Image (cartoon, rainbow, N blue to C red):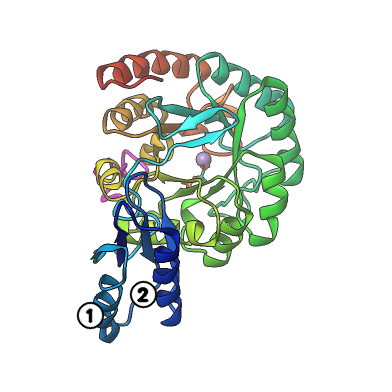
C-alpha cells in the first residue's frame, strides 16, 4: 500500500500518516520522488485490515489518495520507486545512460595473472575489475580461491590501476572484510536465497550485485533483492547469469534475456547480464554479450583471462584479452544504436 500526499501537504500531515501506520505495527518508508510526498508500507498487511486501513489513511488531512501495490516486493518495485536507480561509485554511474562493463578472471590466481587481466580489460574500456577470492565450487576438491590473500591482491591492483572492483562474498562473517577490500560485493547465484548472507550484506550498506539463482523466478529474485534494500543498502544491482538449461550438450546454462526487459519494467534497479556463466562457452560469449546489451541491460559482466587454458576455474568460458577488445568495439556500436554509450 502506498499513500500519496497532496502537493501542498505539510510535514505534520505526513508524520501523522506514518504514526497511524506504526500504530498498526506496520513498517513504512518515505519514498523518493519530486512531485508529491509518498509513503510506502513495506510490511505485509493482514487482509482483514486492508480495507479499514485504506479508509483510515485516505481520510487523513493532506492525503491525496491511497494506492494498492500489486507486487510482493516493495522497495525493489517500480511502483514504489518510479525513476531508474542510478548508482554512483567513485564517479562511475551504473544504471544511467552509459552501460558499464565489468571484466576480469573468474578466480584471482596470482598478482601477475590479475594485473595482466586488469590492465587489458581497462585498456579496452571496462570500468570494473572482477575476480573471485572466495569461490563457490561444486566439488570440494576444486580450487577454492585464494581467500584473504586474493582480496588483498584485488585491492592492490584495483588501487594501482584506478579501476573499481567487484568480488564474491559467500559467508555472512566475511562481509566486513570483503567490503573493506572491494567496491561492490557480489552475491553468487548459489547464495541468492542465503538469507543470513543477504541480511549481513544489506546491513553493511555496501553496493551489492545479486546474481539470480539458476532456478529462481523473477519474484524470488526481487524478494531476495528486497532483503538487501530492507536491511540497509540502497545500491543493489541485479544480475541475470543464466538459468537451468534444457540441454547441457552444447551450452552450460540458458541466458534468460527475457528477464532483462521484464526486470527493467517491474523494478528500478540496474540490470547486469553475465554472458560468461549464462552460456558457459567462450566461443559463444561475444554473441550473448551483444544480445545482452541489445536487450536493455545496464551493464555486462564478462570473464577474461590472460591464459584461459591454464585458468584454475571457468577457463573454458573465459575470453582472451584480444577477443574481449574486439567484443568491446562491437558493443560500443550496439550501445550507440540503442541511444546509449559504453
Ligand atoms: C562467478 O561470477 O564466478 C560465479 C561463481 O558466478 P555465479 O554465482 O553466477 O555462478
Ligand atoms: Mn566463474
Residue 161 locus on image (x, y percent): 67, 20
Q: Which residue does the image show at 71% across and 46% down from the upper left?
A: 147
> Quarter-wise, where is residue 282 in the image?
top left
Residue 28, position as x, y percentages in the image? 43, 67
Residue at disc 1, secondary structure: helix
Q: Which residues are magenta?
A: 245-258
Q: Is residue 153 visible?
A: yes
Q: What's the residue at 40%, 77% (across, down)?
A: 20
Name the secondary structure under disc 2: loop
> Magenta segment: does it hold 110?
no
Marks 2 and 1 close (CB-CB < 8 Å) = no
Residue 38: mark in rendering: none
Label 2 CB sits under 8 Å from any ligand 1 atom = no
Q: Position of residue 57 (x, y in %)?
A: 30, 73
Give the residue pinned by disc 2. 44
Q: Where 45 falls versus 252 (above or below)? A: below
User: Would you say 327 lies left or right of 217 here?
Assistant: right
Q: Quadrant of the N terminus?
A: bottom left
User: On the image, which quarter does residue 80 sit in?
Assistant: bottom left
How far separated are the C-alphas under marks 2 and 1? 14 Å
User: Is residue 302 shown to the viewer in this render?
Assistant: no
Residue at 61% over, 59% down: 203
Residue at image mark 1: 51
- Classed neighbour count for the residue bearing mark 1: other residues with Cα under 10 Å, few (<14), some (14–19), many (≥20): few
CA neighbours of label 2 inside 10 A, class few (<14), some (14 to 19), many (20+): few
**Which of the two marks, 2 or 1, is nearer to us in this view?**
1
Closer to the camera, 2 or 231?
A: 2
Q: Main secondary structure of the magenta part?
A: loop
* Image quarter of residue 296: top left
Q: Work out which residue is located at the far bottom of the displayed protein and give it.
A: 48
Amino acid at each position: 500500500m502506498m499513500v500519496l500526499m497532496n502537493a501542498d501537504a505539510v510535514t505534520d500531515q505526513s508524520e501523522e500518516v506514518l504514526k497511524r501506520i506504526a500504530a498498526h505495527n506496520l513498517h513504512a518508508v518515505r519514498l523518493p520522488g519530486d512531485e508529491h510526498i509518498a509513503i510506502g508500507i513495506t510490511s505485509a498487511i493482514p487482509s482483514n485490515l486492508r480495507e479499514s486501513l485504506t479508509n483510515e489513511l485516505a481520510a487523513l488531512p493532506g492525503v491525496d489518495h491511497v494506492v494498492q501495490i500489486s507486487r510482493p516486493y516493495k522497495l525493489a518495485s517500480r511502483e514504489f520507486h518510479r525513476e531508474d536507480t542510478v548508482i554512483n561509485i567513485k564517479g562511475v554511474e551504473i544504471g544511467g545512460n552509459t552501460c558499464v562493463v565489468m571484466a576480469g578472471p573468474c578466480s584471482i590466481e596470482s598478482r601477475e595473472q590479475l594485473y595482466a587481466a586488469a590492465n587489458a580489460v581497462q585498456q579496452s574500456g571496462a570500468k570494473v575489475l572482477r575476480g573471485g577470492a572466495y569461490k563457490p565450487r561444486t566439488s570440494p576438491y576444486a580450487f577454492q580461491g585464494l581467500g584473504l590473500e586474493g582480496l588483498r591482491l584485488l585491492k592492490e591492483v584495483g588501487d594501482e590501476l584506478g579501476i573499481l572492483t567487484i568480488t564474491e562474498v559467500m559467508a555472512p562473517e566475511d562481509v566486513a572484510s570483503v567490503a573493506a577490500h572491494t567496491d561492490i560485493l557480489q552475491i553468487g547465484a548459489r547464495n541468492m536465497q542465503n538469507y543470513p548472507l543477504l541480511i549481513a550484506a544489506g546491513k553493511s550498506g555496501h553496493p551489492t550485485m545479486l546474481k539470480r539463482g539458476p532456478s529462481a523466478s523473477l519474484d524470488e529474485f526481487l524478494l531476495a533483492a528486497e532483503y538487501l534494500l530492507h536491511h540497509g543498502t540502497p545500491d543493489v544491482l541485479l544480475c541475470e547469469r543464466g538459468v537451468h538449461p534444457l540441454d547441457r550438450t552444447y551450452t552450460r546454462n540458458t541466458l534468460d534475456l527475457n528477464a532483462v526487459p521484464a526486470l527493467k519494467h517491474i523494478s528500478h534497479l540496474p540490470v547486469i547480464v553475465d554472458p560468461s556463466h549464462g552460456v558457459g562457452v567462450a566461443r559463444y560469449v561475444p554473441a550473448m554479450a551483444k544480445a545482452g546489451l541489445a536487450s536493455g541491460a545496464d551493464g555486462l559482466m564478462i570473464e577474461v583471462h590472460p591464459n584461459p587454458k591454464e585458468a584454475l576455474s571457468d577457463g573454458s568460458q573465459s575470453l582472451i584479452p584480444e577477443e574481449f577488445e574486439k567484443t568491446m568495439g562491437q558493443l560500443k556500436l550496439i550501445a550507440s544504436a540503442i541511444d546509449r554509450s559504453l
